[in-house]
Amino acid sequence: MWYRRYWRSNLYSSGLQPLLFLAAMGLGFGSQVEPGPDTGGVDYLHFVAPTLLVSGAMMIAVFESTWKVASGFQWQRQYVAVISTPITPGQVFGGELMWVGMRLLLSAVVYGVVAGALGAWLGPGALLVVLVGVLTGLACAAPIMALSATVRNPSNAFSALLRFVVMPVMLFSGTFFPISYIPVPARMLAWISPLWHGNELARAAALGGGEWLPLAGHGAFLVVLLLGGGLLARSRFYRRLVV
Amino acid sequence: MAAVGERSAREPSPLVSAKALVKRFGEFEAVRGIDVEVVKGEAFGFLGPNGAGKSSAMRMVGCVSPRSDGDLRVLDMDPQVDGPSIRARLGVVPQEDNLDTELSIRQNLQVYGRYFGLSRAHVRAKATELMEFAQLTERADDEVDTLSGGMKRRLTIARSLVNDPDLLLLDEPTTGLDPQARHLLWDRLFRLKQLGVTLLITTHYMDEAEQLCDRLVIMDNGRIVAEGSPPELIACYSSREVLELRFAPGESGDVASTVDGLADRVEVLPDRVLLYTENGEAALSATHARGVRPLSCLVRRSTLEDVFLRLTGRTLVD
């Protein structure tokens, strides 16, 4: 319902924004970058295309699970209205997470198709990149929804989240360059960032290569984050709505 | 608790039955053991000042707030066990409107109906019917944001009827509305009552309770302090008429001793003396005979407000 009205502005932020990044970084900035061992021997365009999809997915997840969710509890209070019906708080959370998943899938597909037209994909691995993007986005959305269901003063919490978590994660998770170029302490932060795990998986899927065990580890990290964050968020929805 | 006028013929299973029901928030006890029974087809009121525990009681009946102690059955089910099945048959009008402000009136009704698992075709027809009922048909495709307070309230009531509920819970349905909007809402609620919908209403408006409720309880401080129909309560806790004598501020105190014995009960306020009596005119002549010369005087019938103020006190509770 809501989407029918806002799809235009939404299409921009979710689908086109990462594509603009792809054009600027991949085609523009990339023209100055020599293919080398750090880019896995491929053009910079091919190097950043998969990770821009994943980081775009993370941004969608962040926006869909912050203000919108907090508003359901305390401004518009739709969740309060919904739990007066047979719907339970757990189902409200499940519905929201599914909604984020659909949004992620849609924009990943749009990005994938347009990036394909720009020649950013080297093979059918792009299809896997779409799935990795959705998984990474959901793994970010679940714990952020738990936060949104908990905080009583979301404005402060969300600006802190954006400034001190999302921004650094976006820059230092191997989206634009391998994390081996950042100092070890900062690199340790990348290790716990879902975006880095998603990026590693996406790049391996698009460009091939990568060893089986580390890739399984990256995938497991995301799945655990999704499940753990999901369980936490579910219980937070109950605690907030059933008092 | 004083029960007035026990109903002789009880239906086998009341729609709501609470025994020693308690709600605690941490240390604070919002509801301190209330006994309530609501039978099919009646309009039952929870009356009380702010913070009396009305809304907490209502939320427990609405199965969105677990009870802390005591026993509660709604539609012959246990809210803790069968919450979703009970909620499927309830209509809820919350104290604060929580409509989806970005959707149109029609969409609000349709989307809400879908939460009850009703089919698209059914909610489409139902939305049209309810907009008619709430006199909102002309605004059907306007966004909720553009509606006045009274229209939003009517829409909230229409929304609560989307599943044809057996029991309608209304938490302060007319708070903040102008007289026109209130009367229109009362009219709609009357119609529902005539259609056999059971109403459970909380309010702190006495006229609303007198207009709508067949039976009510007065709550104060989490407890029920009186129960009965509006006329029963007036008969039991007040007199038939009230004589109000108005004086310049500060003078009323001197009069108190003069009028002593002229009424069943005398209440002295800073600017007024109230005499609760069976015959206001007679009391008025009697006060004149004793030489009392008020600035103005008024004989009126006793209302629920007199009962309410007597039972819950005149002090402001916050």
Image (tube, coloured by chain):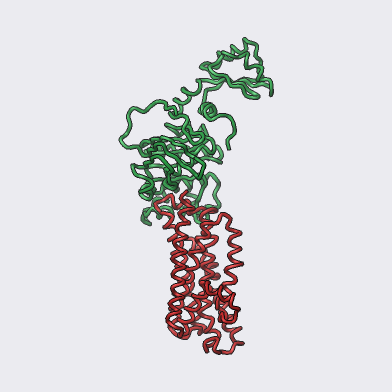
Q: Residue at x 50, y 61 (%)?
A: A145
Q: Residue at x 52, y 22 (%)?
A: B301
- Closest to the observer: B147 or B65? B65
Q: Quadrant of residue B266?
A: top right
Q: In front here: A80 or A163?
A: A163
Whether residue A53 can be seen here = yes
Q: Is residue B288 above or below residue B184?
A: above
Indicate whether B17 appears above or below B102: above
Residue that protrudes farthest toward the top in the picture: B289
Residue A228's x, y, as percent?
45, 64
Residue at (59% x, 70% y) in the render: A167
Q: Quadrant of the N terminus of chain B?
A: top left
Q: Chain drawn red, letter? A: A
- Residue lying furthest front in this view? A185
Q: Is residue A186 left or right of residue A85?
A: right
Q: Is residue A49 left or right of residue A216?
A: right
* Lateral position of residue B170 relative to residue B297, left or right: left
Q: Residue B285's spot in the image, x, y percent? A: 59, 12
Q: Position of residue B136 (x, y in %)?
A: 48, 47
Q: Nearer the viewer, residue B151 or B288?
A: B288
Q: Where, by quadrant of the figure, is residue A89 drawn?
A: bottom left
User: Which chain is represented by green in the image?
Assistant: B
Residue B164 visible to the viewer: no
Picture layout, residue B153 above or below residue B301: below
* Residue A202 on image: x %, y %: 48, 78
Check the image and report above or below for B79 versus A128: above
